[in-house]
Amino acid sequence: MSNRKAVFIKTGIIAFLVLVFAIAYALYVDAAQGNMLVNPSFEWDWKQQGAPELYYPDPWMLEYRDGNAQWCPEPCKRPEITQNTEYVVDGAYSVRAFAPAFSRAVFALYQEFEGDPGAWYTMSCQVRTVSLPEGGLLISAAIQPWGAGFFESSTIRGEATRIREQWVEVSVTAPIYGGKGKAGVWYEVEWPSQNNTLWIDDCSLAPAEGPTQPTQTPYPTYTPYPTPEPCPTCPANGECECLTEDGARRVIREEIDKTFLTSGGN
Ligand SMILES: [Ca+2]
């Protein structure tokens, strides 16, 4: 083997090891920061997935409407998704998605994850948009709490936001119902328009505190009536103004007797 060839192989091995180390370090940093997403910043595993216009990284999954679909009536077009290096928040790449024609568009880019039933999670991403006319593009960080079925406006938790030509963090905190959930970004071009573009980067999914349950006010405990003060000893002339409970009953009884017995019940 020539020296030149040996040096070439050595360089290749070193480059490979550096790449492996970089990927392992990125995974380690994300894990250390509590990020449950894989490939959260779209830095590797880019693939053409399905149509040529759909190029996005694993293990992110795509859902979209096309044609004349429920929640996206005509003209509803499948978005185009590409790798982008022009607008990036973290690392070298972001995802760029855009409605390719005068159309509506609905799509979601998401990952499935496993968690504890009833536990809460926060999903967030950095997003940037350009839309014509301005503000026609609705973006939402979203969690689908069932972990199965469609990832769409009727099943996700998240608040749609209109974002205008600047990087903004969108986030949502929501529970999952079983042991699985889906988390991602949901995009809708609300009315037919052109050049609606979204960039996504630097996403995160992490366990979160759920809302604290209001503490219940304890039911008041029964308090017995205080024992009445005993009457002082009545004076010898019999005039006694202190009326005990028994005495009150006796007075009432006497009044009733007087009323009914002396009048013969008439
Ligand atoms: Ca990135």
Image (cartoon, helix red, strand yellow):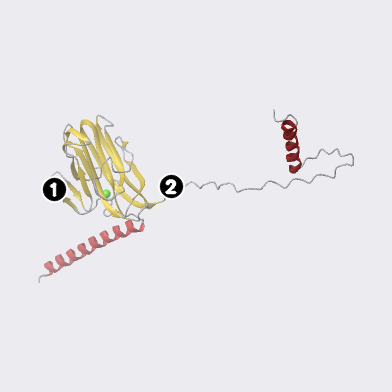
Residue that badge 2 annotates: 211
- Asked which quadrant contains residue 53, the reply is top left
Residue lying farthest to the front in this orientation: 264
* Mark 1: amino acid: Gly
Residue 145 in the image: state x and y as whole percent: 31, 48
Q: Depth-wise, is mark 1 or mark 2 nearer the camera?
A: 2
Left or right, 209 with reference to 248: left
- Asked which quadrant contains residue 8, the reply is bottom left
Residue that badge 1 annotates: 50
Above or below, 200 against 194 in this view is: below
Left or right, 258 with reference to 161: right
Residue nearest the observer in this picture, 162 or 252:
252
Residue 225 in the image: state x and y as whole percent: 68, 46
Residue 183 in the image: state x and y as whole percent: 29, 48
Residue lying farthest to the top in this orientation: 266
Mark 1 residue element: loop
What residue sits 20% from the left and 63% below the top? 16
Residue nearest the observer in this picture, 61 or 90:
61
